[in-house]
Image (cartoon, coloured by chain):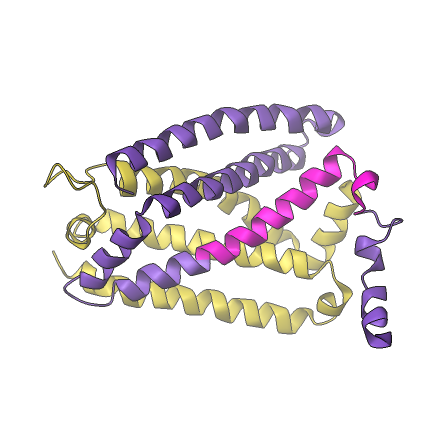
Chain colours: A yellow, B purple
């Protein structure tokens, strides 16, 4: 197992290794808040009987900038952690490890693209206040 | 047939009896590692589905699509399936915590014990997750 980690770190780099741990810890916090806020806090508070997540309720919450910042923070962490995790798995296979540059660029494009997509979707809510 | 056999030959390292991944050849730490990878890959797939469905449904300014999606995903079968997601996340998070501990130089010599301690914590969290899912099902929401 120790050999596995060292071998992987050599190909994948020290910074990605460190950031993978950092985002892991952040994601545990983000996920706990995410589940509490979206499924338990205030859900169905207005009607009192339909405990469904509604567009109205989410829009209202996103009027507070902190939720937009938290959403983008979580999105950044989840994209890095997921795609870098995938990268680590891929690099254990020679056919991908031999194409490191291509994999790096492809995953970077997917990550940044998804982040931009997330910002584009959240933009209308930011000015909703 | 011959080509199929040659394709299968490439996967001997994975499925063969001498493979380090052959079930009886794997020990606790290896199972933990394989489990971490499989749950990790599953979660990447889930996250991208989650993001694409929710962002697409959020595009209609009146929120009609979003509410329809929430209605659809709150049906009992899908909420029950969320429990699978809860278990997968808990395993990945708890074994991930174990990995971070090792990187900090803690518990490597007792890695098996640490694994089972984390699995005990996972069991407790899973009961909590079951309660939460039950709560959502009972209230008819999600």
Say which of A117 and B105 sits in front: A117
The x, y position of residue B124, in whole percent, is 49, 24
Q: Quadrant of the N terminus of chain A?
A: top right
User: Relative to A81, does residue A93 appear above or below in the rendering?
Assistant: below
Residue at x 34%, y 63% (from the top left corner): A118
What secondary structure predominates along the stretch shown in magenta?
A: helix
Start-end of magenta stretch: B21-47
Q: Residue at coordinates 83% horizontally, 47% vertically from top-left?
A: B20
Q: Is residue B136 above or below residue A18?
A: above
Location of residue B121 (image quadrant): top right
Farthest residue toward the front? B1
Q: Position of residue B100 (x, y in %)?
A: 60, 37
Answer left or right for A13 relative to B51: right
- Residue placed at 70% from the left, 61% from the top? A91
Quarter of the image holding residue B136?
Answer: top left
Say whether residue B101 is left or right of residue B4: left
Residue B112, position as x, y percentages in the image: 72, 27
Q: Is residue B58 magenta?
A: no
Of B130 and A82, the residue lying toward us: B130
Percent position of residue A111, x then y: 47, 64
Residue at image location 87% in from the left, 49% down from the top: B17
Instruction: Please tell me whether residue B109 is drawn above or below residue A93 in the rendered image.
Output: above
Q: Quadrant of the C terminus of chain A?
A: bottom left
């Amino acid at each position: 197992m120790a050999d596995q980690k060292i071998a992987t770190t050599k190909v994948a780099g020290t910074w990605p290794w460190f950031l993978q741990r950092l985002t892991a810890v952040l994601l545990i916090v983000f996920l706990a808040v995410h589940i509490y806020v979206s499924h338990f806090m205030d859900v169905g508070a207005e009607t009192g009987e339909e405990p469904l997540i509604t567009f109205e309720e989410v829009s209202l919450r996103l009027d507070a900038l902190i939720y937009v910042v938290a959403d983008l923070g979580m999105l950044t962490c989840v994209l890095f952690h997921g795609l870098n995790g995938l990268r680590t798995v891929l690099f254990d296979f020679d056919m991908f490890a031999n194409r490191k540059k291509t994999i790096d660029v492809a995953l970077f494009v997917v990550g940044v693209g998804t982040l931009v997509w997330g910002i584009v979707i959240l933009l209308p809510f930011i000015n909703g206040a | 047939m011959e080509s199929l056999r040659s394709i299968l030959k490439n996967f001997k390292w994975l499925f063969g009896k001498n493979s380090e991944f052959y079930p009886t050849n794997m020990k606790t730490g290896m199972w933990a590692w394989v489990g971490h990878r499989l749950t990790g890959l599953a979660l990447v797939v889930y996250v991208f589905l989650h993001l694409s469905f929710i962002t697409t449904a959020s595009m209609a300014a009146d929120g009609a699509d979003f509410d329809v999606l929430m209605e659809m995903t709150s049906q009992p079968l899908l909420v029950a399936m969320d429990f699978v997601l809860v278990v997968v996340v808990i395993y990945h998070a708890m074994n991930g915590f174990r990995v971070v501990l090792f990187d900090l130089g803690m518990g490597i010599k007792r890695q098996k014990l640490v694994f089972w301690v984390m699995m005990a914590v996972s069991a407790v969290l899973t009961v909590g997750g079951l309660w939460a899912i039950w709560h959502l099902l009972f209230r008819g929401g999600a």
